[in-house]
Amino acid sequence: MNDITIRDIKVFVTAPHDINLVVVKVETSEPELYGLGCATFTWRYKAVVTAIEEYLAPMLKGRSVHNVEDLWQTMKGSSYWRNGPVLNNAISGVDEALWDIKGKLCNMPLYSLFGGKCREGIAVYRHADGNSVEEVEERIREFMEQGFRYIRCHMGTYGGNFDGTIQHMVHPKGAPDGAYYSPRVYMQSVVKLFERIRTDIGWDLEIMHDVHERLSLADTLDFAKEMEAFKLFFLEDSLSPAQVQYFEKLRNQTSVPLAMGELFVHPLEWRTVVQNQWIDFIRCHLSDIGGLTPARKLAAFCEAYQVRTAWHGPNDLSPIGMAAQMHLDLAVPNFGIQEFAGFNDAEEEVFPGCPKLENGYAYLNDAPGIGVDFDEEAAKKYPPTDKMDFSWLFSRLPDGTAVRP
Ligand code: GCO
Ligand code: MG
């Protein structure tokens, strides 16, 4: 095999959706050949940029592009202290770009390189949110008219901190500002919302909900049992990664399908829950676990336990990262569903070749590699923003205690 080497690694930050996205470009000794990867950890993007520019790029320049697994292992070990979203995202940017290059060298879309299609389109779910049951139902109906059959339903975003006035919260004197929410009010409002959805809209729709690790262990068990009545497609992140052992109790006491994983960064976090079949869907954020290389292994590991994939697909993920995981969606037998927040016109402009939606399915183009390009000139029109809303990250209980967002 002709040796093709890494000539340079460049990092770009762009915000076509007012969310900082981190794109990695690996240029090679072949003038026209490059790969693109996603390294978006939007809340700490400068740290990721530094990790790539200061550490990975100097280490990798001049190395052969061919041995992706070896380069992944090398990057992983190169800091001695490892793991965590900053370093994993940095590795992911390079890893996905190397897979992109591999696909281009083979002249195949990645799904084909991964064994070919198990399905023709990728079923996706959308988010219906609003300030009242009526608003959420309106959103659901709009999505259904567009052909979506899977909808994640929320009211007032995560934790239901939708309307301080009805939550009757009394904070202690001097309580700091924050995104306050009441677990009790949240749980009751979701149960009511789902009752109404099933009554008003019916049963010919797959619905899900994201707890976003907002509940105590006892509350989450109680909540999961109440939600059984609505036959969810899944209940997401009912626990934090630090409490995954408690999935054993949930699994033993409720039949609600459980999804978990967007905050996972290491195999130890998923090994036990998958092996014991305590969860039904794995929904890691690909760049947070280090890219396509570990995600392929994770998908295969899950297959053995009938755990299906539902990779994380929020807005803080570049179209390159979205397409990268969609190649897995097409190629693995144990695909479950794909979260897909959709792209705006500016994202489509900056990232030519974005996946397309039709009638509730996403489709990739058949270009070699990941199939999504990056228009550096267009990206300059959407420079990094310092106006991102961090406020929701400071969630607090009514008594003023800071909790995970
Ligand atoms: C989801 C997620 C996201 C995260 C976001 C954090 O299921 O889509 O929970 O909305 O909150 O990606 O930045
Ligand atoms: Mg989530």
Image (cartoon, rainbow, N blue to C red):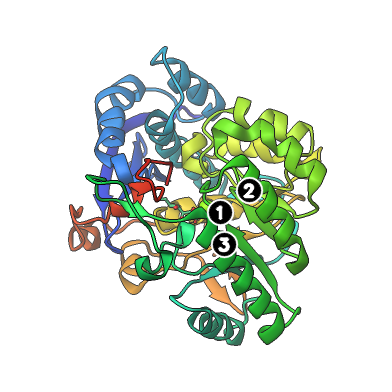
Residue 233 x/y as whole percent: 71, 62
Q: Earlier in the sequence, mark 1 or mark 2?
A: 1
Label 1, label 2: how many angstroms apart (C-alpha)?
8 Å
**Residue found at x 32% / y 51%:** 171
The residue lying at 38 percent from left, 41 percent from top is 401
For marks 3 and 1, the one nearer the N-term is: 1
Judged left or right of residue 11, residue 149 is: right
Residue 197 in the image: above or below residue 373: below
Quick check: is the Cβ at mark 1 less than 8 Å away from ligand 2?
no
Per the image, the residue denoted by label 1 is 211
Which kind of residue does numbered mark 1 sit on?
A: Val
- Labelled disc at residue 392: none
Residue 89 in view, yes or no? yes
Between 125 and 286, the residue placed more toward the observer is: 125
Which callout, 1 or 2, points to the residue nearer the camera? 2
Mark 3–mark 1 distance (CA, rounded to whole Å)? 36 Å
- Coordinates of residue 267 in the picture (x, y in percent): 61, 28
Dot 2 corresponds to which residue? 220
Residue furthest toward the top? 80
Q: Earlier in the sequence, mark 3 or mark 2?
A: 2
The percent coordinates of residue 32 (x first, y second) are: 35, 47
